[in-house]
Image (cartoon, rainbow, N blue to C red):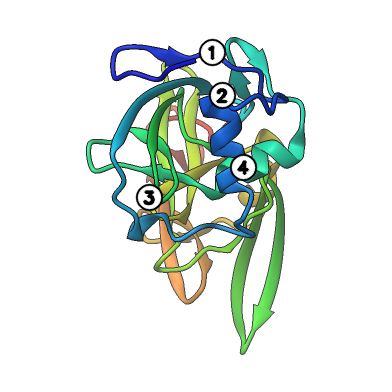
Amino acid sequence: MSVTKQGETKADPDSADGSALAGLIARAGSFRGPAPVHLWNPAHCGAIDIRIDRAGTWHHEGRPILREALVRLFSTVLRREADGGYVLVTPAEKLDIRVDDVPFLAVEMAVETSEGRQNLVFRTNVGDVVTVDAEHPLRVAEAGEGEGLVPYVRVRGGLDARLARPLVHELADHFEQRGAEIGVVSGGQFFVLGQVSEGPANDGAELSGGAVSA
């Protein structure tokens, strides 16, 4: 099986038959935790038929990859390129993959206090644990008409996680209003998530853009 810049690989994620995907698995398997992908500049070897859907599920050739260990392994060699694309990269090769939204999903949230400061901590579906701070900011984006605002957190190296729906409701419990802005505090920073809007039809205030949702 070959990989070209025009084509895509054809391989079973569970195979070990010398295919491009099996080779990638073997090489990536030497890493524990995120690999130093920012240091690598291998040749571009084309595209591989791997897609991460909006729910954070990884697919190969249209089928979900069910082995959690394999998904976590791939996540350690995932990199976002300057043009916004995503690649799986090792010191020897670089392969394009498709990402529908962002690659990760935040699935658990904890609130900790350190030295009198509140910290919001998220765990992703691939095992990253990240504290919201200046290097790992929280942001919101418009999800579409009627869907409100969707929160994201920076995980590492330009890779973001979208907050799962239950976490959005947990996050709302920690909203603060400062002037016309609504946001949350973490890591000594105030992260603005929306603006207060008032009108004749409103008795109070609400987030502009609609309710926060995922």
Q: Residue at x 69, y 52 (%)?
A: 127
Q: Residue at x 34, y 55 (%)?
A: 40
Rounded to the nearest angstrom, the CA distance separating label 1 from label 3 is 28 Å
Please identify the residue farthest to the bottom as the structure is shown. 115
Q: Amino acid at mark 2?
A: Ser
Please identify the residue farthest to the left as the structure is shown. 83
Nearer the observer, 30 or 212:
30
Which residue, given by chain and number where applicable, does mark 4 sit on?
26
Q: Exactly how many numbered labels are in the figure?
A: 4
Rounded to the nearest angstrom, the CA distance separating label 2 from label 4 is 10 Å
Q: Residue at x 29, y 50 (%)?
A: 41
The answer to whether the residues at label 2 and label 1 have Cβ atoms under 8 Å apart is: yes
Q: Please give the label number shown on residue 158.
A: 3
Q: Please give the label number shown on residue 87.
A: none
Q: Amino acid at mark 1?
A: Lys
Q: Is residue 109 above or below residue 95?
A: below
Left or right of 85? Residue 202 is: right
Query: Which element carries disc 4, helix, strand or loop?
Result: helix
**Residue 100 place in picture, x, y as percent:** 46, 22
Q: Quadrant of residue 22?
A: top right
Rounded to the nearest angstrom, the CA distance separating label 2 from label 1 is 8 Å
Q: Earlier in the sequence, mark 2 or mark 4?
A: 2
Which residue, given by chain and number where applicable, does mark 2 sit on?
19
Q: For the residue carrying disc 1, how many other residues have a C-alpha within 10 Å: few (<14), some (14-19), or many (20+)?
A: some
Q: Residue at x 51, y 73 (%)?
A: 187
